[in-house]
Amino acid sequence: MAARSEIDVVIPSWQGRDLTLACLEQLAGQTVAVRTTVVDNGSSDGTADAVRERFPGVEVVELATNRGFGAAVNAGVARGVAPFVVVVNNDVLCPPQFVERLVAPLRGDSAVGMVASVLVRPDGRIDSYGLEVDRTLAAFNRFEGLRLPPDALDEDGLLGPSGGAAAYRRSAYEAVGGFDERIFGYMEDVDLALRLRGAGWRAAGARRAVATHFRAATFGHRSSKQVSIAGFARAYMVRKYSLLAQGLGRAAAVLAWEAAVVAGEFLLGNGPAAVRGRVRGWRAGGDAPAAAVPWEVVDEKIGVLGAAVRRLRAVTT
């Protein structure tokens, strides 16, 4: 009998058959044994059948409808028992040593609950090396849009991993309840990282775990749908973490940031979507369990200018 893998890989998918098959092809060549689960979010493109045919060793979980990223990942994680969980977007291609390098910090330090990978775009620019948040909990992909070799990266201000390709210690993930399924897409990784850090778990980076991300392949880069979903997540987080009740200074900073972002979306032609998403997110946040911000993990050094530069880089590169 084959030894049980200590790594569960979970891949959420929606209407992405070819992307999912390409992702699985890369994962099949990993230098460590993995148990892989694909969670299909109600696709109509034959993803589930294609995966079963091409990769009979991969478990397929079919959801009746598209329940979003977090719900899909939670469903996949629940099907496994391995101590380490690796979450990979179906639009990410992982070279052979990727998973081994990504889980290395979990093996080396029992206090580490999550690990960030380096995601690069097809053109060689960095997509993310984990996440960082400013004093308003505005979240940014670290080093996004830059051309830097992995050795030039650092972990200063690292909150946690991007959900595009991340590793989690199962015991930590389960203890905080996994992803918040009220968030359909975007910022669910930020929320999980905040809750993990608040529970005392550390975040680590794996600079040698580098994969290619075909970014926004699911929702479409800068589409109205993407802007609306992101707006929902942002307003939901503002209310869930009671940011407007954290003193006048912080509340004013949050409102100013939101006004600037929405104004920018109007200039880009997506303003109505940004507003509608935020209205829905604010309403949904009223039903969310209250969460406290572990302020010590917030990067207060980002500042207004730093946040503006990061935002501009995100929408223009």
Image: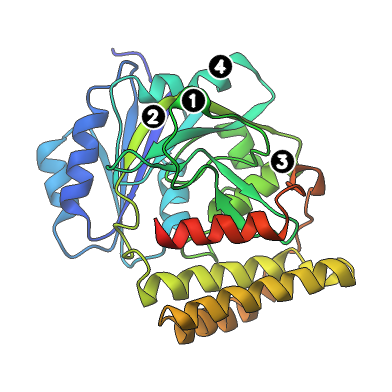
**For the view shown, which residue lies furthest in the left direction?**
53
CA distance separating discs 1 and 3: 20 Å
Q: What residue is disc 4 on?
A: 107
| Of pointers 4 and 1, the one earlier in the residue sequence | 4
Q: Which residue position is annotated with label 2?
A: 210
Q: Residue at x 64, y 38 (%)?
A: 158
Q: Earlier in the sequence, mark 1 or mark 3?
A: 3
Quadrant placement of the N terminus: top left
Mark 2 vs mark 4: in front = 2
- Identify the secondary structure beneath mark 1: strand
- Which corner quadrant of the image does residue 114 belong to? top right
Q: Residue sitting at 73 percent across and 70 percent down?
A: 254
Residue 86, percent from left and from top: 44, 34
Tell me which amino acid carries mark 3: Arg
Q: CA distance from mark 2 to mark 3?
A: 24 Å
Q: Which residue position is annotated with label 3?
A: 197
- Distance Cα–Cα, label 4 vs label 1: 16 Å
